[in-house]
Amino acid sequence: MRQSGRRMAILGGLLLVGSLTVGCGGSDETSGGGNGLEKKTLTVAALPLVDGAALHIGIKQKLFEAEGLKVQVKPVQQSIQALPALAKGEVDVIAGANYVTFLQAHEKGTLKLSILSEGAALTPNMMNVLVMPKSPIKSAKDLEGKKVAVNIPNNIQSLTLNAILKANNVDAAKVQYLQVPFPQMATALQKGDVDAVHIVEPFLSDTQKKLGARVVVNGGGEPVTQTPISGYVSTQDFVAKNPKTAAAFQRAMLKAQAAAAGDRKKVEEVLPGYAHIEPEVASVITMPDFPTSNNTTRLQRIVDLMVSAGLLKAKPDLGAVVFQGGKA
């Protein structure tokens, strides 16, 4: 792992380029084609995170091709960066989209959200709080008054971590969250710019190997275990105009989710390609849960958490938000 620092720096640059180019436009190929699809080429903005592995498994196994679809992947560093492009129709789908950002955008009217497929749910130790080996921080209580890096403030990380902290009698209001993109968290921690990082796989395992970083909070522990955190999202306008295309994507995506859930090796095989990590790291990372169906009861967990934290004013109609057109 001696080359890890340089590799992650390169990754950050690649992702930045990806985030800048994501607005270059979705496909205008709407001539239909196989299966009577309204649109046969989809542009999918995707993050280099484990919870988006099923997309790449689907591409590798030609599950989208089997439905008459071609998927073009646009890398992004944060799903929020692709939100304007999705709203404008410049990308068709966002993979690994964190639910907090998009449920908030739906409530504000920035876009009318359509969830095509669930992506990932929290499992223990897939998103942990790390500190340097010699840090005086030993427990969750020690995070009070400290700077903790998160990818996006007031979002899925702080939402779930605050729930864990409160359950452990920690005053979450005393934790200072700072925005640091995942690929840059290890450097920020090593330099002392932050006291701790709330980091997700595959960056979590890489940072532990590179810095010997210690876990002080299990970010996937109770009371947030199995909480849905991300999915494959589009807009209600897109699915209304392209119902057969959306249904085809959903069918392929759920098959890919089942492949990811059923065989860890399939996830390990695709991670080095899109997440730019060593195969040795891919073999040891903690996997999220890959839901194999769309379940509004399960999604209600993230909605309830957001409402209780003041991140949503009211509960959305998940029956209208979750697209149900993909049944074969």
Image: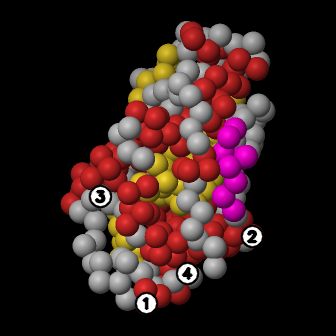
Q: Residue at x 53, y 43 (%)?
A: 99
- Numbered-mark total: 4
Q: In which quadrant is the C terminus drawn?
A: bottom right
Badge 1 vs badge 3, beta-carbon distance below 8 Å: no
Amino acid at dot 1: Gly
Mark 3 near mark 4, Cβ–Cβ under 8 Å?
Answer: no
Give the spatial CA distance, label 1 vs label 3.
22 Å
Residue type for callout 4 = Leu
Q: Is residue 38 above or below residue 199?
A: below
Disc 3 element? loop
**Mark-to-mark CA distance, 4 and 1:** 14 Å
Is there a contact, CB below 8 Å, between mark 4 and mark 1? no
Tag shown at residue 63 = 4
Marks 1 and 2, Cα distance to the nearest angstrom? 29 Å
Report crowding for label 3: few under 14, some 14 to 19, many 20 or more residues within 10 A (C-alpha): some
Mark 3–mark 4 Cα distance, whole angstroms, equals: 24 Å
Indicate the secondary structure of the residue bearing disc 4: helix
N-term-proximal mark, 2 vs 3: 3
Residue at (62, 50) in percent of width and height = 319
Tell which of 256 and 266 is nearer to you.
256
Q: Which residue is mark 3?
A: 89
Q: Position of residue 9 (x, y in %)?
A: 36, 48
| Residue labelled with disc 1 | 34
Q: Amino acid at mark 2?
A: Gly
Q: Nearer the viewer, residue 308 or 21?
A: 308
Lateral position of residue 128 relative to residue 323, left or right = right
What's the mark number on residue 262? 2
For the record, the magenta segment spans 293-301
In x, y percent, where is residue 243? 46, 70
Label 3 or label 4, whichever lies nearer to me, is 3
Sequence-wise first label, 3 or 4: 4
Q: Earlier in the sequence, mark 1 or mark 2?
A: 1
